[in-house]
Amino acid sequence: MSSDIPGFELPLRLFLGFRVIIDELHEELARQGHPHVRPMYGFAMQAIGAHGTTAVDLGRRLGVSKQAAGKTIETLERLGYVERARDPHDTRKKIVRLTERGIDSLTRSAHIFEDLRARWARTLGEDRLRAMEEDLRTMTPTDAFRLDMPGWFGGL
Amino acid sequence: MSSDIPGFELPLRLFLGFRVIIDELHEELARQGHPHVRPMYGFAMQAIGAHGTTAVDLGRRLGVSKQAAGKTIETLERLGYVERARDPHDTRKKIVRLTERGIDSLTRSAHIFEDLRARWARTLGEDRLRAMEEDLRTMTPTDAFRLDMPGWFGGL
DNA sequence: CTATATAGTTAACCAGGTTGTCTATCGTGT
DNA sequence: ACACGATAGACAACCTGGTTAACTATATAG
């Protein structure tokens, strides 16, 4: 079914590879006390980072409009993963920072990601996996986040 | 930026690999007279296949609800990529079939996919690429389409 | 001190999905 | 022969992650 078109298998499998990892991550994350974290939130929180950002900057980093970034921030705030405060040096700005809970979800994600990668390494062999990662780095843009990463998802 | 979490690079690169291929495909497809084909339509048309289907069956193949499949069919019909006709043997059913234009877009997609794969093979080496494809097959579900493929996209 | 640029909010919209409900038709069991 | 359950499709209301456009408030450069 997927082999009707020879060249089609590659992108399909790349997507499925992404999907199985992200799915397993979020299943485990749900088990560890973060049932409401959706894949997008993870990308956004990672882009917000330890030092915080503003809505405009987050939009730029994720490659979406400031309005879309604003909506995401609002959702994350409602769920308790980030908090906003006015910037004293520029009262137009609102600095978005990760809360304890936000940092916890990122930390747990990191551990789970490493476990999943380890499982791939056990199945494929560390050298084969490293080769795959290297080849993917070769074929994909250098600065991942700048290249309109998650903005692409919904618009598919 | 993407290397904050070690295990995160793998899924991110897998997604970006998928993305660059699908993006280039659709750019080229647009140049070849199909500017309105979105990635989802390609998946749907491939699932419809040469013999045609019904909305319910298409939904099952793509892993989405029959209503979602119906909406996609409506869009494809409006764009002239499929046509619907009542099934004479079961008047509840409406058979969805690819039009000439629909078949043309799939044929062109196939050629472009093969070109893109060839480019990867030239850069990485045929054996490295084959190894990647094999490893991805190992780590992803066998029946790609049945595993709720594109339904996942929008919901991310 | 005015003009322009920037940060954030709000509103209206789109695409692709969901669930629930409804009608029409098919097919089976008594 | 027919009533009843299963199936196909259509419709409505809603969700999420996006978009543009228009607005207010603040900062900054000339």
Image (cartoon, coloured by chain):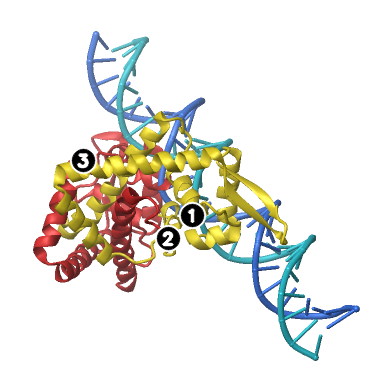
Chain colours: A red, B yellow, C cyan, D blue
Host chain of mark 2: B
Say which amino acid is labelled 3. Answer: Pro
Q: Are marks 1 and 2 in contact (CB under 8 Å)?
A: yes
User: Which numbered disc covers residue A141?
Assistant: 3
Tell us which disc is closer to us: 1 or 3. Answer: 1
Residue D21 in the image: state x and y as whole percent. 50, 26
Nearer-N-terminus badge (1/2): 1
Q: Residue at x 46, y 33 (%)?
A: B34
Say which amino acid is labelled 1. Answer: Ala
- Quadrant in which residue A31 is drawn: bottom left
The residue identified by callout 2 is B145
User: Which numbered disc covers residue B47?
Assistant: 1
Q: Are marks 1 and 3 in contact (CB under 8 Å)?
A: no
| Above/below status of B154 relative to D18 | below
Residue C21 in the image: state x and y as whole percent. 71, 64
Q: Please state if D27 lies on the left or on the right of C22 as rendered.
A: left
Q: Secondary structure at mark 3?
A: loop
Q: Residue at x 43, y 42 (%)?
A: B107
Is the C terminus of chain A in the top left, top right, bottom left or bottom right quadrant? top left
Tell me if I can see residue A62 in this picture.
no
